[in-house]
Image: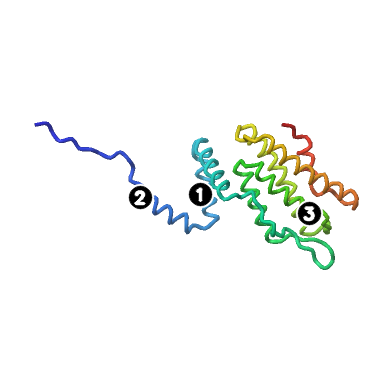
Amino acid sequence: MPALETVHDSRPVLGHVNLMMDSFIANADIDDMRAVIRSFLATNPPSVTAAFHDTARRRLDKMNAKQLSPSTQLFSRSSDGFSHPTPELATVLRRARSLYGAGMGLASLSLLTHVVRATLGMRWQEDGDTADILAHIDADVTQAIQSSKEELAGGRVTDLSGARATVSELQSALIHSDREAEIWGCESPFERALASVQYWKF
């Protein structure tokens, strides 16, 4: 009589590990989580980073992160007539940075175009908090443009006409801002962004 075969399940037992890891994810300090993710991505093959990017993009797309509520107030005007950033602006900029950081540059540009438009007609003190945040926005738009170029080069953009429309709307807002600055005799707040978008051909 032949010996009975012992069937071994080669699948890893993940339930307990997943439960423990979920507990870590749910309770870890945000700085610890950042350190863990950075270390994980830096010490694994590039394919792991690519998979992470794909997962991040699916999450952001599912959350419709590029949409901005019409009621969102990005700047407020004080009694002296100068405008200042609101806490909502910080939230929107974090979303934009998440988008271009995950390789969704065009979606980020769409969001940043709303931000640039919100600055039209504003006045601000050249050495105040608004001037500082405008410099950050200038850098954000420039980085989002680079992310968009990589998105196009990677073949992840299927709607080229829509992409061109997004870039055209951004360029229009930046030109409008630049002309206002010239009229008021102040430094253009988005000089680098405007130069980047004007020299971008696709």
Instruction: Locate the C terminus and report the quarter of the image it occupies.
Output: top right
Marks counted in the figure total 3
Please state if 189 lies on the left or on the right of 29 as rendered: right
Please report whichever mark, 3 or 1, sits nearer to the chain's N-terminal start.
Answer: 1
Query: How far separated are the C-alphas under marks 1 and 2?
Result: 21 Å
Residue 82 position within the rendered picture, expressed as x and y whole percent measured from the top left: 82, 62
- The residue carrying pointer 3 sits among few (fewer than 14), some (14 to 19) or many (20 or more) residues within 10 Å by Cα, namely many
* Amino acid beneath label 1: Val
Residue 108 position within the rendered picture, expressed as x and y whole percent measured from the top left: 66, 45
Task: Say which residue appears at 73% left-offset and 52% top-offset.
Answer: 115
Task: Say which residue appears at 15% left-offset and 36% top-offset.
Answer: 4
Q: Residue furthest bottom?
A: 79
The residue at which mark 1 appears reads as 36
Task: Say which residue appears at 76% left-offset and 39% top-offset.
Answer: 197
- The residue carrying pointer 2 sits among few (fewer than 14), some (14 to 19) or many (20 or more) residues within 10 Å by Cα, namely few
Please report whichever mark, 2 or 3, sits nearer to the chain's N-terminal start.
Answer: 2
Please report whichever mark, 1 or 2, sits nearer to the chain's N-terminal start.
Answer: 2
Q: Is residue 181 above or below residue 87?
A: above
The residue at which mark 2 appears reads as 15
Residue 92 position within the rendered picture, expressed as x and y whole percent measured from the top left: 66, 54
Question: 44 and 120: which one is in front?
Answer: 120
Q: Residue furthest left?
A: 1
Q: Are marks 3 and 1 in contact (CB under 8 Å)?
A: no
What SS does tag 3 mark? loop
Instruction: Locate the N terminus and report the quarter of the image it occupies.
Output: top left
The residue at which mark 3 appears reads as 119
